[in-house]
Amino acid sequence: ATLRRVLYAYALRNPDLVGYCQGMNFVCAGLLTVLSEEDAFWGLCVLIEIRLGYYTPTMASLKVDQNVLNRMISYKHPKLYRHMGKLGVSIFAFTTSWFLCLFMQNPLPYNTTLQFWDYLFCYGDEMLFLMALEIL
């Protein structure tokens, strides 16, 4: 019930631009495990509104960041980049959930994700790219 209330409140806060996007539930649930309902709401506002383009119908900012990550992979892990290309594997297939859910859905254990969030809050979205590169 708490998760539903926080997500509904956020959808009311920003109905035209975001409303509700799948992936927000994982972020909100993670916040609710360590914060009160009101603090989780405001934390969700910050996390979503910093990267609004992730949660819009076009997901434009998400696609931009995935392209940036793809380019970073080509420089940091060229063998992996070529191998994925040969297999026809696109990073879009798995990084969408990583970025939308801020690694809460997978592939990290819960406690590791919360530690990652600490870094994300302190150092910003650069951490999304660094974590993705480390996982790969």
Image (cartoon, rainbow, N blue to C red):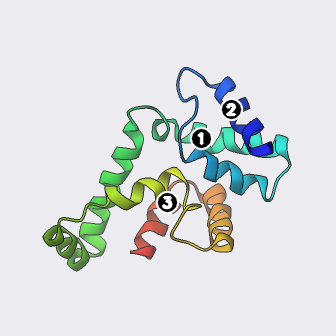
Name which quarter of the figure residue 68 lies in.
bottom left
Left or right of 73? Residue 129 is: right
Contact (CB < 8 A) between labels 3 and 2? no
Q: Residue at x 19, y 76 (%)?
A: 83
Q: Residue furthest front?
A: 1
Q: Which residue is mark 3?
A: 128
Name which quarter of the figure residue 81 lies in.
bottom left
Q: Earlier in the sequence, mark 2 or mark 1?
A: 2
Contact (CB < 8 A) between labels 2 and 1? yes
Viewer-side label of 2, 1: 2
Residue 36, placed above or below residue 86: above
Circle 1 crowding by C-alpha within 10 Å: few under 14, some 14–19, many from 20: some
The type of residue carrying mark 3 is: Leu
| Viewport quadrant of the N terminus | top right
Q: Earlier in the sequence, mark 3 or mark 2?
A: 2
The dot on residue 23 is: none
Residue 77, placed above or below residue 48: below
